[in-house]
Image (cartoon, rainbow, N blue to C red):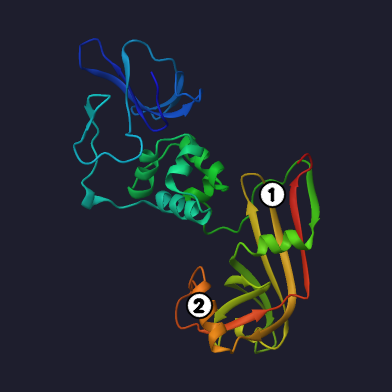
């Protein structure tokens, strides 16, 4: 008997063909998929360690693709109910998994292999409003370098870093090469400026790194546009809630408007994302760092 994460374990009742109990396999203890398994039972939602007996069999999620509606599983002799293709509608968890996978540059097949689950099961999670088990989310979070909370969207309206601090934290300075590597991942950073009314302001912007310069696009009348022709501070960071670790990079330098038409077209072509706030934001601003510093918090034994 061999299984993948997401397969269904069925234990037959005394009467032939009568299912007594079934559940989702959410944990494997051997790389070859042999028993025992951690099973989340459909009747109680509890997870228990199971050593299947002769009255048990597995319904597999087909390796490599989703079953079409009503398709018979050749090795299990059973039909797995799958909604019609037109009914496909990914849920929030699936969208977050797919987005993080693409951000990491991983194919669905490679992600499934690293998470030790069937590619078809991962496809189901990404494309349907599925309710994956905690065990499946833990494995995906580890592969994608994120947390279960982040994949579930928990804490979206809360600031990061509400968890407990590490028992023995280590704070170390990052060298310039490490800072550049973290900055170059692009994403959302914060720019500190003096607003037109003279008050300090910090605003988030979608940014890119091009030829060692931090670039972002905004509107001429925006708060971020006040950075032009001034020295500004730009900060980007990441917090791992699950491990109570994180890093931050601070760049300081003069901000200039990019005016060359060919350079503007090149930046637009290379941009990974349009500005999240939407609207017309066609003024590109470039920050050429004169100072680049960073820090990272990890456990002392790392």
Q: Is residue 290 above or below residue 282?
A: above
Residue 294, image x, y percentages: 76, 61
Q: Is residue 78 above or below residue 52?
A: below
Viewer-proximal residue among 80 and 241: 80
Mark 1 and mark 2 lie on one chain; the one further toward the N terminus is 1
User: Does 145 sit above or below residue 202?
Assistant: above
**167 relative position to 76: left or right:** right
Tell us which disc is closer to us: 1 or 2. 2
Q: Where residue 132 sits in the image (x, y, percent)?
A: 41, 40
Mark linked to residue 268? 2
Residue 183 lies, with reference to residue 225, above or below; the image says: above
- The residue tagged 1 is 245
Secondary structure at badge 1 equals: strand
Marks 1/2 in contact by CB < 8 Å: the verdict is no
> How far apart are the two marked residues, 1 and 2, measured between alpha carbons?
34 Å
Q: Which residue sits at x=61%, y=82%?
A: 285
Q: Which mark is residue 39?
A: none
Which residue occupies the extreme front position in the image?
262
Quarter assignment of residue 283: bottom right
Which quadrant holds the C terminus? top right
* Residue 89, x across and y down, in percent: 30, 52
To which quarter of the image does residue 230 belong? bottom right
The local secondary structure at tag 2 comes to helix
Which residue shows up at 27% across the image and 51% down it? 88
């Amino acid at each position: 008997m061999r299984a993948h994460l997401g397969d269904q374990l069925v234990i037959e009742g005394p009467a032939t063909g009568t299912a007594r109990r079934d559940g989702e396999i959410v944990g494997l203890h051997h790389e070859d998929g042999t028993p025992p398994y951690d099973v989340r039972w459909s009747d109680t939602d509890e997870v228990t360690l199971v050593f299947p007996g002769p009255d048990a069999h597995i319904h597999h999620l087909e390796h490599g693709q989703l079953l079409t509606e009503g398709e018979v599983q050749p090795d299990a002799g059973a039909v797995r109910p799958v909604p019609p293709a037109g009914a496909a509608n990914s849920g929030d968890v699936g969208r977050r998994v797919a987005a993080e996978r693409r951000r990491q540059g991983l194919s669905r097949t490679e992600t499934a292999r690293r998470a030790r689950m069937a590619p078809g099961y991962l496809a189901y999670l990404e494309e349907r409003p599925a309710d994956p088990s905690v065990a499946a989310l833990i494995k995906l979070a580890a592969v994608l370098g994120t947390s279960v909370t982040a994949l579930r969207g928990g804490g979206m309206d809360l600031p990061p870093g509400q968890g407990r601090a590490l028992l023995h934290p280590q704070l170390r300075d990052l060298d310039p090469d490490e800072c550049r590597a973290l900055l170059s991942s692009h994403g959302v950073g914060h720019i500190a400026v003096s607003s037109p009314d003279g008050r300090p302001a910090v605003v988030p912007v979608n940014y890119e790194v091009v030829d060692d310069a931090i670039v972002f696009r905004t509107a001429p009348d925006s708060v971020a546009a006040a950075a032009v022709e001034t020295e500004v501070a730009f900060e980007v960071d990441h917090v791992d809630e699950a491990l109570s670790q994180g890093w931050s990079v601070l760049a300081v330098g003069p901000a200039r408007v990019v005016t060359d038409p060919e350079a503007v077209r090149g930046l637009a072509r290379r941009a990974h994302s349009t500005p999240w706030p939407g609207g017309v934001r066609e003024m590109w601003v470039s920050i050429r760092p004169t100072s680049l510093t960073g820090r990272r918090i990890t456990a002392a034994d790392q």
